[in-house]
Image: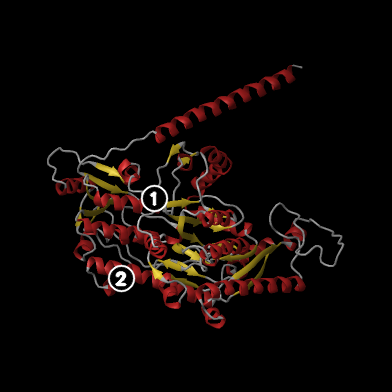
Amino acid sequence: MKSFLKYVLATIVGVVIVNLVVCVFFVLFIGALAVFSEKTVTVPEGSVLTIRLDHPLQDRVSDNPMDNFDFFSLELNAGMGLNRILESIHCAATDNRIKGIYLNLGDIQGTFGGLATTKEIRDALEEFKESGKFIYSYSNLGYSQLSYYLATVADRIYVNPETPLVLTGLSSGVTFYKEALDKLGVQAEIVKVGKFKSAVEPYISTEMSDANREQVKRYLDSTWEHIVGTISESRGIPADSINALADRVDFYTTEQMKEAGYFDNVVYEDEMIEILKTECGLEGHQKLPQILLTDYQHAPEVALQRPFAAEKIAVVYAQGSIGMEQSAKAIGPELAQTLRKVREDKSVKAIVLRVNSPGGSALTSDIIWREVNLAKEEKPVIVSMGDVAASGGYYISCAADTIVAEPTTLTGSIGIFGMFFSGEKLIEDKLGIHTEVVNTNAHSDFGGSFPLPVPISGRSLTAYEHKVLQNYVSQGYETFLSRVMAGRGMGHDELDAIAQGRVWTGADALELGLVDVLGGLEDAIDIAAEKAGLENYAIAEYPVAKNAMEELLTQLTGEVKTRVLQKELGVYYDSWQRLKELTAEQGILARLPFEISIRQ
């Protein structure tokens, strides 16, 4: 009896403690939201707009405070999307309170290297310079290759004396898992169309195919040529000298880099502040007025830059892998419903589909393609490609009236593959699990069973099953080609020659006819306005963000786990996430074959 009472009492105490913790959590959370929501921003006269790109670049970050709440640290992270970054830079150009822009840079992170998105920011800063205001760049912790690329837009580039710039060029590494799978007794079952469709190679080979090496080399060369060309033009350094520096891979002092023209001066951060004060006409102990870009976006004057008009251009964001569920970082069939809603909205006169996706589900891609095609019949549809719009990302783009891409956008990859895992040796020989099957028809157990709580079949595909799947994938590839042929006005053989799953940069895709214009999101909006005959219009962004309570439930179920893994795995989190996605994405896919990151 005493034992029973002891356990009952312990349970009651436990419940009380949990409820208290939950209550405290919600009080803190509501308080944080209240502070964030009531935040008013005042821009002092003579301010310097400080830009720090210390959060991963995204096309769009929700204005809903819940989206910016970190349940792991219980903090509000004021991240910014490309849409708000561009808007704020344009507003600053005509804001008399802003004296200039201070780029306080470190590493820059973004999807597939983030170079195309960074270029859009750089272009906006280039336009800002037409206002006559200054742009100074400084790095206290060191420029990465990507952040230095952005810094070259500045009037002057400064750096901490002890943080040398290391230009090494670009590299792509592919990790192969075949031998590990062999040791585990797991076999990858592959069906695909396209000799360049290499997403499956890590699971069936121990080295890159010649075709894959060719496309990766071309993409890296094209991207590096753009980076070198931009640095050369901005800093007046011959491209050959930049490549020679990259080939040597030596740690030159910042003073040596200054003499070579890469920096204008070498100073500590306190000295940098004094330089900014002098530029703003301040003396002595006068404090430099600075406003962060993350705060400036909330200034009432910036919000007033968003025009209200009866006629609208809808900007529909499609960012993340294409699958069966829609979220802020993933594309699902719900995006087709959003496009249908926008198509049926009479106040929307044109649509800009912003695509930043490596692809994914072929089925979902086709569902979205259908709505893009229907929308084009009623109003102009312009696609703006971000860092990546390949495979399924190109599938949902190809029906548009006009496709706009950056020179370094990763696109194309017109191909389809299917991937399944079987673990007969693992399940039977190593674990001793045996399955007996009773069928009603000849192929009722098509693909085998799954005796483990992981997506690994208990048997391999039969030769007949493999043939059936190969025919299905081949049909899917022909469907993909037919969508592109209709949208781009190409013949079958002409398209097939540049398809086959091959990845292209935006610059190469322009020459091949896969895109129409080189440019960014704002260029796409301008084209949409011109095609719709609009002079005064408002921008409406879709999909509409979830309300705070919906986001709370989403965050509680998934965000905490994600944050913990990110903290624990660090730089290995991306590799773990990619492996997780691939095992979850078994089936017929239209997806890019690799990931890209640009690091120092």
Residue 156 visible in image: no
Q: Residue at x 81, y 66 (%)?
A: 443
Can you say whether 38 is above or below 249 in the image?
Answer: above
In the foreground, 533 or 552: 533
Residue 30 visible in image: yes
Q: Which mark is residue 309?
A: 1
Q: Secondary structure at mark 1?
A: loop
Disc 2 to disc 1: CB gap under 8 Å: no
Horizontal placement of 127 versus 414: left or right? left
Horizontal placement of 499 versus 436: left or right? left
Quarter in which the C terminus is drawn: bottom left
Quarter in which the N terminus is drawn: top right
Q: Which residue is mark 2?
A: 229
In the foreground, 473 or 10: 473
Q: Secondary structure at mark 2?
A: helix
In the foreground, 1 or 511: 511
Q: Characterize the local packing of mark 2: few (<14), some (14-19) or many (20 or more) Cα atoms within 10 angstroms.
A: some
Residue type beneath disc 1: Ala
Disc nearer the start of the sequence (2/1): 2
Q: Position of residue 391 (x, y in %)?
A: 54, 67
Q: Which mark is residue 102?
A: none
Residue type beneath disc 2: Gly
Can you say whether 404 is above or below 337 in the image?
Answer: below
Q: Position of residue 48 (x, y in %)?
A: 23, 46
Q: Position of residue 347 (x, y in %)?
A: 46, 53
How far separated are the C-alphas under marks 2 and 1? 41 Å
Horizontal placement of 57 versus 430: left or right? left
- Count numbered badges in the picture: 2
